[in-house]
Amino acid sequence: MTSSRLFRHGPGTLFRTASHLPPRQIAYQLRRRLGGPARRPKATSLEGVTGLLARLPAPTPEGEPSPDGVCLLGQPPHDPLRAGWDPPVGPLYLYTLHYHGWLQRLPPALALATIDHWIVHHPEGVGWEPYPTAVRALHWLGWLSGHIDDLDGMTRRRLLASLAGQLRHLERHLELHLDGNHLWTDLAALAAGALALDGPRAHLLAPAVARFAAVTGEQLALDGFHRERTPSYHCLLAEQLAGVVALGPERVDPRAGRALRDNLARMLAVLPAFAHPDGDVALFGDSQRGLVTPAALATRCGISLSQGTDHNAPASGLFRRAWGPWTLLWNAGGLGMPQQVGHIHADWLGYELSLGGERIVVDAGVGTYEVGPERAYARSTRAHNTVTVGPGDADQHELWASHRIGGRGELVDLSFGTSEVSAGVRGFRSRAVHHRRLAWDGRSLRCSDRVLPDHGEPVPATMRIHLPQTCVVAVDGPVVHGRTPGGRGFAVRGPADQRWQATAAAGWTAMSRPAPRHCLALPVGPGGLEIAFELET
């Protein structure tokens, strides 16, 4: 991909991006650009919080402590107590450092020292931006819920005063310019503070409970999936909601409490739509494995994660099919939240596939949010298990920067049944529509693709599937023979007159965690293309 394709965008792209933002969001965007990020609080600590009324279940830890510091995002260890809270790294790492997500994994004395060091040495800066403030508040509340009884009175007062200052700063700087998961997390932290903390200043946060209930309702699709359409973010947000529900919101606002419980139930019910038999998410959009998994979330909330069953989430374009030994997870596509598409990839009509409990068709995932070739590839249509249509492997959407989309593709003709699912997508400015049908005939899982041009002239198109390099793969003309690490054999059969093109492709299971893939490609001609997945002994 050329650098011009990576970075060039003009007034048309900007207009197509901004045209999906509601006027209020545009106003908040302008305000933030003029004022800059909220990194300087009016007060770093406030009196008026006296203790805990309720205990928040600790969020899933993030980060692995080591003798040399903490390992975050697959990077070498960093010790903030020795090297500080502002290392010269990218914004995602800085955010994650200021989340304090590893506190639960530290000995209590070291966790307390980490909190105290941050209070003293980071009175302003990136750690005070709203999102890291919100996530850190949830981790602090989770840690305090397990350790406050062991703290002396002066230490309690110091920590609670800092937490009160952070929540007041957050309350003044809600991320209305972004909406989506950022606003959700901001309000989850404020609602948790209102319910968990005691004292007059905590009581001032009570309106956040109703506001959080309203936002959770607005951001969930009819099928219960979060409208940003990214499985790992759905699980993270559901865990935040579960934490607030565990604090008993009904005692502050009965109506909001019922809404929050109902919305949590909906979020849990849709988990099978994107969960593999291994209990983790499909890597659709900016999803990562090993974070808040569907299996862990279900255990936390005391429910069973339905496995071996079909599931439809048609409002969000997600479908699960248990066909014989295969588990198909299909991303039909859609734009659930047009004003916030930062985590959506050009991956519509793509799928992931498990054989038994092992993944054999895998999506690209995400390895970085930094602008550059790696990020551009991970979001591109050619990185996913779908079809590129048009010269130069054109993308389905007008992708730019790290999280921006200008012109968008269009989903058409969605249909789903017990033994087949199908839909079409017209990419941005595409001269053709790609139709895909996935079906089970009792022996083979078949994927059929057609590319229908607008004016009769053939349009170049390429179908790709990606297998993890942990699978042994051998190309034999029109057939690919594969074997999983667990020893299960399978074949992918194409047309007898074609030969698979096999190349190496990048992939990731999580940030900075590469998972190289085999890319298998075939052209989609005027007559279409059908491939079949079959078992082999």
Image (cartoon, grey):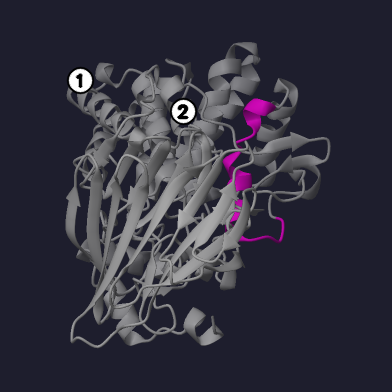
The mark nearer the N terminus, 2 or 1, is 1
Crowd class of label 1 (few under 14; some 14 to 19; many from 20; radius 10 Å) = few
Residue positioned most to the front? 496
Left or right of residue 429: residue 534 = right
Q: Position of residue 180 (x, y in %)?
A: 33, 51
Q: Residue at x 39, y 27 (%)?
A: 307
Q: Is residue 17 above or below residue 238?
A: below
Report the front residue among 343 and 29: 343
Q: Is residue 94 magenta?
A: yes
Report the front residue among 110 and 532: 532
Q: Position of residue 317 (x, y in %)?
A: 26, 50
Name the quadrant containing residue 254: top left
Q: Is residue 51 above or below residue 29?
A: above
Q: Is residue 163 above or below residue 381?
A: above
- What stretch of residues is rendered in magenta? 87-105
Q: CA distance from mark 2 to mark 1?
A: 30 Å
Can residue 244 be seen in this snapshot? yes
| Quadrant of image for the N terminus | bottom right
Q: Residue at x 61, y 17 (%)?
A: 147
Residue assigned mark 2? 295
Q: Is residue 431 magenta?
A: no
Q: Position of residue 258 (x, y in %)?
A: 21, 23
Q: Position of residue 470 (x, y in %)?
A: 65, 48
Q: Which numbered disc, 2 or 1, marks the residue closer to the eye?
A: 2
Residue assigned mark 1? 254
